Image (tube, grey):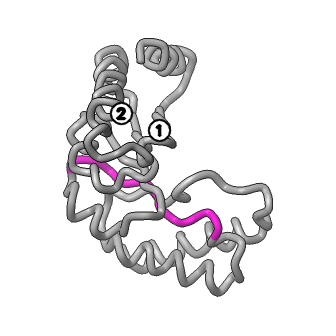
Amino acid sequence: THVVSAYLIEQVKHGAQALMLFDTWGGILPALKFKSFDLDYIQKITHAVKAQCPNTPLVVFSKGCGFYLSELAQLGCHGLSLDWTIDLGMARKQVGDKVALQGNLHPKVLLQSDEVIRQEISNLLHSYGKGPGHVFNLGHGITPDVRPDAVQVLIDTVKEVSSKLNA
């Protein structure tokens, strides 16, 4: 915990303008263990970073932890990055405007046809709805087998659908 906090703080000292704390395995913990084995440590890291870098945005990604969004939103981070296992609109209702939401397209969607990519992105953005507080992203890392033109379809579709939604 101390090492991760120090590492994040050093990133800011060396020019990082925003930080993301990745917790890829939190979702595999039994519900009764999540707080003591995961949430408490994320909170310690978040508080340490905010104490030293109060103006640096901090986003927390805890894969598979959609059931704990309310608790994660109380940590004092600026945003929560979501994997694809939670509906973005439901997440927005659950956390309100406490934090921004980032995500949450399943990375494997980018292996589908352009038509499917466009439809999935449109569904996701419509689920969130109109207004600020959403950063479009994948729900986890992009895989090496994704076609570069599929990424361009993603970018173009996000721009197109977002501009129509927020017009």
* Image spot of residue 6 (x, y percent): 46, 13
In this image, 92 relative to 140: left or right? left
In this image, 31 relative to 105: left or right? left
In this image, 139 relative to 74: left or right? right
Tell me, yes or no, whether the two marked residues, 1 and 2, touch with CB atoms within 8 Å: yes
* Image spot of residue 21 (x, y percent): 46, 34
The answer to whether residue 150 is above or below residue 29 is below
Instruction: Reply yes or no: does residue 102 show up in magenta.
Output: yes
Q: Secondary structure at mark 1?
A: strand
Residue 167 at least partly seen: no
Per the model, the C-alpha gap separating discs 1 and 2 is: 9 Å
Residue at 42 percent across and 54 percent down: it is: 82
For residue 23, the mark is: 1
Choose between 99 and 106: the one closer to the eye.
Answer: 106
Magenta residues span: 98-108
Q: Earlier in the sequence, mark 1 or mark 2?
A: 1
Which of the 4 image quarters holds residue 55?
A: top left
Which of the 4 image quarters holds residue 107?
A: bottom right
Residue 98 at least partly seen: yes
The answer to whether residue 56 is above or below residue 72 is above
Residue at 69 percent across and 82 percent down: it is: 114
Would you name the residue on which mark 2 appears? 38
* Image spot of residue 8 (x, y percent): 48, 21
For residue 146, the mark is: none
The amino acid beneath tag 2 is Asp
Residue at 49 percent across and 37 percent down: it is: 22
Instruction: Reply yes or no: does residue 104 show up in magenta.
Output: yes
Choose between 148 and 88: the one closer to the eye.
Answer: 88
How crowded pointer 2 is (Cα within 10 Å; few <14, some 14-19, many 20+) is rated as some
Residue at 22 percent across and 55 percent down: it is: 95
Q: Secondary structure at mark 2?
A: helix
The N terminus lies in quadrant: top left
